Amino acid sequence: MSFCSQCGAEYTGTPKFCVNCGASLAPADFVQPAEPIRPAEPIQPAEPIQPAESVQPIELEATPVQEPAAVSSADSDASAGVGAAAGAAAAGVGAAAGAAVGGSPEPSYVPPSYSAQQDYSRSSYDQNTNPYNGQKTSQGLLGLAWNDVKTAEGLVPRTALLGLVGCVPILNFVTTGYCLRWGRRAAFRTGDELPTDLFGDKAFVTGFYGFVIALVFGLVMSLCNLIPLVGWIAALALCVPMMLGTTYMALVDQLGAGFRVSDLWEKIKQDFGGLLCICFVPSLIVLLVVMFVVFMFFGVSMFAVVAVDTSSAVAGGMGLFGVLIVLACCYLIVAVSVVANLVTYRALGYWVGRFAPDWVQESVRTGASPL
């Protein structure tokens, strides 16, 4: 059975024209009906997967490792010689190749050398850089300072001259500044000799800054003294940050460094007992020596006056002779105090180098000279 492609009329056989619409019925226009769609066959279920058989573990037998035979010293020397020769040959080949390509062999690497100032400016302040080798104790610092003072060349004439300068108001700032500038060298370990120029290296300015710091702390200590017992102890304890702040000031050449209370407190907590000994022991020894010398000097002088003329004892004691005795005692006190300050600030310099190396690095960054 066929259908017309134009009107869809059904016809049988093979006519040339459609009886319904008259359209030509060519063989190609015959439309065959489509075959009916057969239903799909049902899908058969897959067979279940059989479980795998259990794997039997493989037992491995441990084979003992044989130790290598000991190499004799002759063999090791020969191996070392061969290795050295091979290394030298390789180096020679590399140098020859460099000469052939670039015209000159590449220079060998030379490790850089650091000076004292550069060591302190390096980021890592390890035991190889720190001259104190990581020691965290103040034991022996006073001994080091005293040894530096007593072995210093020209100690007596410089101490005598500093004693005279210290008796002059305003000019006595030079004495304190001189002791501070020499003490700060201990933190840098740049020299143990005393400076020849008393007025050089900002001695007057450093001494004046030290006077300002001592004046401010002195006012605070005066207020503490108004409180009995507790205030007295607090006033004595304030001497430690005062002297350490003065050393910090001399190290970085900045007056404000002496009033950085938080920085001072962080360092004091590390070794308060050692700082207490450094600040007070030299002064106490000097005080005892001065008291003994003054007592002996006055006793011998008055005995001599009385032995010569009893009637002139009072006049001599109150006249020119007495004035000379007072001046001599004052000069003696100042001269011995100079020695005490040299020992104290030298020991504080060692203490800073051991417990506060970051202050030394700051001094280098700010351009303060260690000399």
Image (tube, helix red, strand yellow):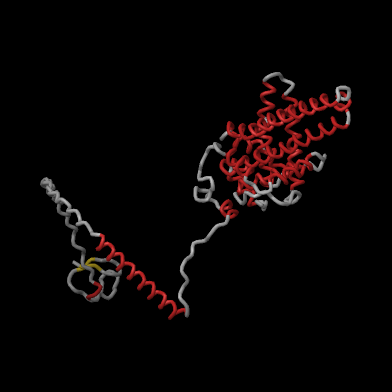
Q: In this view, does 163 lie to the left or right of 75?
A: right
**How far from the left and from the top, in percent, is residue 342?**
67, 41
Q: Which residue is drawn at 73% across and 37% down?
A: 213
Residue 105 location, quadrant: bottom left
**How far from the left and from the top, in percent, is residue 187?**
61, 46
**How far from the left and from the top, in percent, is residue 318?**
87, 27
Q: Residue at x 74, y 35 (%)?
A: 214
**How far from the left and from the top, in percent, is residue 147?**
60, 42
Question: In the rendered view, would you say 156 is above or below 329?
Answer: below
Picture quarter with the N terminus? bottom left
Question: In the rendered view, would you say 119 is above or below 156?
Answer: below
Residue sitting at the far front: 308
Q: Can residue 50 be seen in this view?
A: no
Front-lying residue, 98 or 48: 98
Count all numbered tags in the image, as a single digit.
0
Question: In the rendered view, would you say 5 is above or below 189?
Answer: below
Q: Is residue 279 left or right of residue 40?
A: right
Q: Is residue 9 left or right of residue 364?
A: left
Q: Is residue 225 visible?
A: yes
Q: Residue at x 67, y 46 (%)?
A: 182
Front-lying residue, 301 or 232: 301
Residue 234 location, quadrant: top right
Front-lying residue, 203 or 303: 303
